[in-house]
Structure formats: structure tokens, C-alpha cells
Amino acid sequence: MYRLTDAQKARVKELLSQMTLEEKIGQMNQESVSIVGGFDVPFEELIEMMTDGRISQEEFEKIMSTAQQDYHEDDIRAGLVGSLMVQDPRKANELQKIAVEESRLGIPLMFGLDVIHGYRTVYPIAIAEAGTFDPDLFTRTARMAAKESRTQGVNWHFAPMLDVARDARWGRVSEGPGEDPYLVSQFAKAKIKGLQGDRTSPENYVAACLKHYVAYGACEAGRDYNTVSMAPSMLHNAYLPPFKAAVEAGAATAMASFNDLNGVPCTVNPYTLRHILKETWNFPGFVVSDANAIRECVNHGIAATEPDAGTHAANAGMDVDMGTQIYKKHLRAAVERGEVPLSVIDEAAERILSVKMWLGLFDHPYVPEEAMSRYEVLPEEHRALAREAAEKSIVLLKNEGNVLPLKKSQKISLVGQLAASREEIIGAWAMSWRESDCVSIKEGLERAGAQLQYYPCCGPETDINEEEVAAACQYGDVIVAVVGETDAMSGEAASRADITLPGHQRELLERLLASGKPVVACLMNGRPLALQWESQHVPAILECWHLGVEMGPAVANVLLGEKNPEGRLASSFPAVTGMCPIYYNHMNTGRPGGRSKFTSRYLDAGFEALYPFGHGLSYTTFAYDRLRVEEQPDALQITVDVTNTGTREGVETVQLYMQDVTASIVRPVKELRDFAKVSLSPGETKPITLTLQKSDMGYYNDAGEYVLEPGLFRLHVGGNSRDCLTTEVNITF
Ligand code: BGC
């Protein structure tokens, strides 16, 4: 929980009283390390030249190796920098020393970084981890990342990413916990606890940054940075709740999103920043812009000039400028011209200093020398946690004829370039990993003692090697094909207009299937894929996502049955791309999708997700029975008997959904309200009780007011969002 003691607050006030206007604005300036010299064009242009192919990656790297890095030492000394992005502990200490010992007031720097799914120990991407439905795990992985990063000087994570995302074309679905506001909110609370909760030592916690505030996940057509238009009720019911949950959990900072929301970029949006976040929710931390976003307000056409954009942003409640120097260069003049009230600057500086105070930076500004090498070799404990997270994230989408688990006696043809890759298992937004820590699927299977031959055959971006395919079809009793996306195909600026398997991988599967041998598709990807064809032809499909350093052992354990899969989908999978956006908690319509033509459906794809939210099979089976509801004054207790009807122990994720059948505005067909994981032995039955607080049965209307309307509610309980037992209750509040 981010809260200051009275003594800390007094210390901040005292410091503020000594600061000049420039020094206060300095705190609002975040720098990244700039590259200078060695080339004639600006750095941004150079990156573009590499991206559009005018220079090769090798040429780019060569130029970089001769360039100098500018760490803004003079500005730090002058008190004109509040935070930086650096992840070299010695460099961080060096810069910190300048700030603490050579600047007039000795205010320490914050060092921020995108630690999205692990620092040195990379664990599964968020969309995968969310599918574990395991808040305790969310907390433990975050805590591990906090501790590791702090040994490298990073005391501020640009995480958790809390964008509800419902369009799988958007590359950033990989970074966030999926399509459901309730699950994303649970993820939010657990991550804040993990990142900020252990304050027994300054080395154990960091400042979290909830991002991207807000509605970035609804960018039109799934194209990154695109515009967002949405009714206030949708904003309040679906997109704001995770942020509210994170604020209530005590998040220290927030990052505004790139997109405009109903015409106003979130960077300069007084309604979302000031009215909702700071005034309605009483968020005590500070807000940072996204990279370069203040400048981009000129591109948005909402500001004529950069100084103008800075004025808008500051007045809207944007406390820190990431990377444009617009505050540094222009805010003072704006204050002097009376365009930005001094109180805005005072408030921002106070918020920033308070976070630094809470982080303990005034008393412990440096990374201790002995901490720097603490994770030089990854501790087994960290690997074990990464493996646990990876195993629990794997989702068995389909298992016709019980092809899985494989038997140790079976000979395996392991196919696909991704199967032997140590880099691709890491996924988008991992910045501090080492290849030597990573275990590929091939290595994982080999270590587990599987009998296998490996045939690369084809990757997401390469042609099919026919000879290797022929050999693969010849050798194994079973073929395991690792297919999917490279890590660069998801994440920021990685939207795809066609989300089927990229390249020739479907053809590869066709050829393998033609052998007549059982084929298992192991998917490695950063977004839901459109798998209509695969679901019709491939007998077993295992969704493995990008699982991090321990991907190999985790996948091997699930394939070989050492671990019974228990992961669920945090995002619906469409059958074909054209169904995007698709999500289970969609609004009712006057003609709900059905068999007949004049219903809300596609002629060529129906209306249902191929694999719905919450779906995930096991090597055993579960049955649900006797759904009952007990009404208490403030809550409903919903109990169901769950039985393991198969032959081995397994973990089921029991999900409770609610539908407000009649309301003043159209409501979703289902909304997740609670879940519980239960482990059951073969034949065992357990009653599972889930809770629905009556106060959670309302919704926000278009005026942004939360209303509870009495009437009929439907309650659905099951192992996914589609197959549920249903009952009805009449509730008066
Ligand atoms: C991303 C943010 C990230 C920031 C700093 C931006 O491009 O949108 O998610 O935190 O860069 O790296």
C-alpha cells in the first residue's frame, strides 16, 4: 500500500518549501538515455531507417556501438531531472550520486523500466499468467521481479498493464490480463501487492505503475495507437474497474495511455486524470505520460505547438513528462504567463517527492555493491516459481482421442523452428533476460528423457523444408509441432490484420497430418489466434503462449503427463479473424446469435468464439451438479458440487457468472463475479461455494453513477464461460 507517514509527509513539505520553480519542474521531467554523436540524423530517424529497411540491423548496431550515450549528468546536477530509464546498477549509482551529492537539494532519482513479466527470471506473458486464475501466483511472481530489478537499480516498474483487451488483432493483448474486468481487477490487486507489498527492506519493493490509463485496449480495429470511442457506461463498467481496483490496492503511480478517448487524448484528459483518478478515486500517487506522448498531442491535432501540448498536459493533471523535455523547456514560461497555475506544479512535485520518500530513496539511494551480483546465477527458487507459473498457464484447448499425455515409450518427432528456440519463448517486453537462462521446448523434452528426433521444418517466417517434413513423418509414433508467432509478432506496435498461424505453418500441419500419425500442435504465441482450420483437423492443441525461461520443462511436463494442465483462456479465441473483437461478456442484442439467419451472426462463421473465455481442458474430466443459492443480507452464497469424473487427479477452475436480466440499460449476457480453484482426486466430489456481494450486482450508467436495480438475475456456474449450470434469483437491494 502506498501511504506516507506523517513524518514523511512533513519531510516532503519541508523540501518543497525550499525548491525553486525550475527544480519542481525538474522533478516532472523524465529522461531516457539518449544516443548522441557518430551519425548525422536524429536518433528517432535512425530507428525509422532501420525499421523501414533503409539501413540493416547490422549497420544500425555498428553505428550504435560508436555512438556516445548521454545520461544528462549536467541536468541531474542542476536538479532538472526527476527520473530516468537505466538498468545498469553501477551507472544508476553514479547518476544517483550526482543527484544526491552534487545537486542543490540532493533529491534522489527514480529509475523506471518496463518489467512486464519478470526481470531476470522471465515468467509467462500476462495473458498467459492471467489464465492461471491464481492471484497468489500473480503476487509471488511480481515480488520476485521487484526484488531482482532492485538489485539492478530499477525501483519503478511500468507495470502492471491493466488494459482490458477484446480484440486479438491488437499486439498488446499479450501484455495484459485479458478481456474480463473482474479477472483483470484481481490481477491488478495481486500485482500491486507483489510489487509494493513487502516493505521489510528497501530492496524488496518497487513503485508500481498502473497502465495504460485508459481504454487503450479498445483501440479501433485492434490497430495500435488508434482512436477510442466509447459510451461512458462501457468505460465505467469494463475499462475503469481494474484501475480503480489498483488504486484501492495502493498503487504508487499511473501511466496515461496514448489513445484519445472520445476525442481527448488520455495524456491531456482532465476528465480521466483529474476528475476520475485524482478527485473521485483520491489517487495519491503521480501520473506519468507514455513515451513521447505529450509531443504526440500535436499530431493528434489537439495542440498547435509543443509548448501548448505541455500546458494542456500539466493542467489536465499529468505530473511527469516521459522523454520529450517539453516540461523542462516550456513549463516555466507557461507558469509565468499564467497559463499553468503554480499550484499545478506544486501538486505534481509533491506527488513525485512523496513516491520517492515512500520508496526510501532519501535514506537508501544506492544499490549496495553486494546486491548487484545476487542474481548472477538464477536461484533455483526463482526457476521453480517461473516453472510453476509456466506449467499452470498452459491451456489444453483440444484433446481428441486422448492423444495427450504422451507416453514415455512413444517416439516423438519434434517439429518447428520455434521448438528449439531459446529467444522466442521469452515473449514481448522482456528486457533483462539472458539466453543462457532459457530452456527451449526441445531441451525441456530432452531433459525429461523423451525419445525424440528434432526436425525444424518451418518457422513463422520461413519456408517449409520438404526433406525434414518427410523425415519427421517417418520417425515418430507421434508428431509434436511447435507452431505460432515470434515474440516480435505481439507487443507494442505489433498489431496483425490476420491472426491465423503466420507463414506456412498451416501447410506444415497439413503435411504432418497427411502422415496419418497423431499430431499435437503446441502453440507458442502472444495473442489468441484464429484456429478454425486447426480445430477441425489437428487432434490435440496445447496453448503454450510465451512462457518465459522455464518454458521447455513446463511444456515437457504437460506433454508427458507429469503435470495435468489447468490453465484457462483469459481471452476468447475467434474462429476467424473477422470475428474480432470477440469477448464472452458482450452486450445483449434484440436478436441474440442463434441458428436462424436473422440473428446477430456471421453467414460464414456463426457467432460463438471457437474457444470461449475460461475454457481449458484437463487430462481428467469434471462434472457439476446441484447448483444452489443461499441469500444473506449482503451477499449470495452460491454452491455447486464438483466431481472429478476421470481417472487422475486434476485442478478445476470453478467460475461464477452473473446476468442482470432486465435493467435500465442493456447489460452483458454474462459477467464473471468470482472463481475458485479446486484440486480433486478421481471420483472425489467437493461442494464449492462462491460469493456474490449484492453491492457488486449493480452497474454504472452513462452519467458515471453506480446503480443497483432490483429484479431478476441469472447465475451461471461452470468450468468456462459457455458451459454452465444456471439458476435465477430475484433480488431487492
Ligand atoms: C509503452 C509503455 C512503456 C513505455 C516506456 C511505451 O512505448 O507504450 O508501455 O512503459 O514505452 O518504455
Image (cartoon, rainbow, N blue to C red):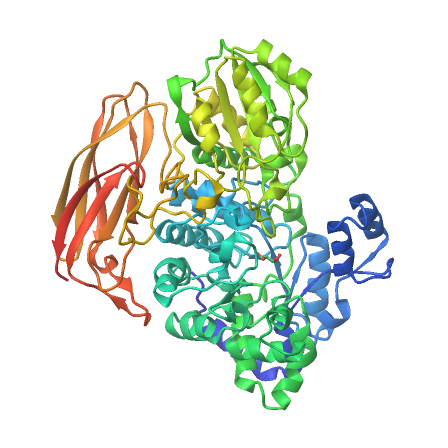
- Residue furthest toward the front? 597
Task: List x then y, in percent, for residue 6.
Answer: 44, 73
Residue found at x 36% / y 27%: 618
Front one among 65 and 99 = 65
Q: Judge whether residue 720 can be spotted in this image.
A: yes
Q: Is residue 296 left or right of residue 138?
A: right
Where residue 49 sits, quadrant-wise, is bottom right
Task: List x then y, in percent, for residue 375.
Answer: 62, 41
Quarter placement of the C terminus: bottom left
Residue found at x 37% / y 67%: 232
Residue found at x 41% / y 47%: 582
Front one among 667 and 278 = 667
Q: Is residue 621 above or below residue 426?
A: above
Residue found at x 42% / y 75%: 275
Q: Judge whether residue 20 can be spotted in this image.
A: no
Quarter placement of the N terminus: bottom left
Task: List x then y, in percent, for residue 24.
Answer: 61, 78
Front one among 721 and 355 = 721
Q: Is residue 457 left or right of residue 583?
A: right
Front one among 168 and 17 = 168
Where residue 121 sits, quadrant-wise, is top right
- Residue furthest toward the bottom? 337
Task: List x then y, in percent, for residue 117.
Answer: 54, 45
Give the image quadrant in which the ligand numbered 1 is located. Answer: bottom right
Where residue 604 sits, quadrant-wise, is top left
User: Could you tell me how many numbered marks the image carries?
Assistant: 0
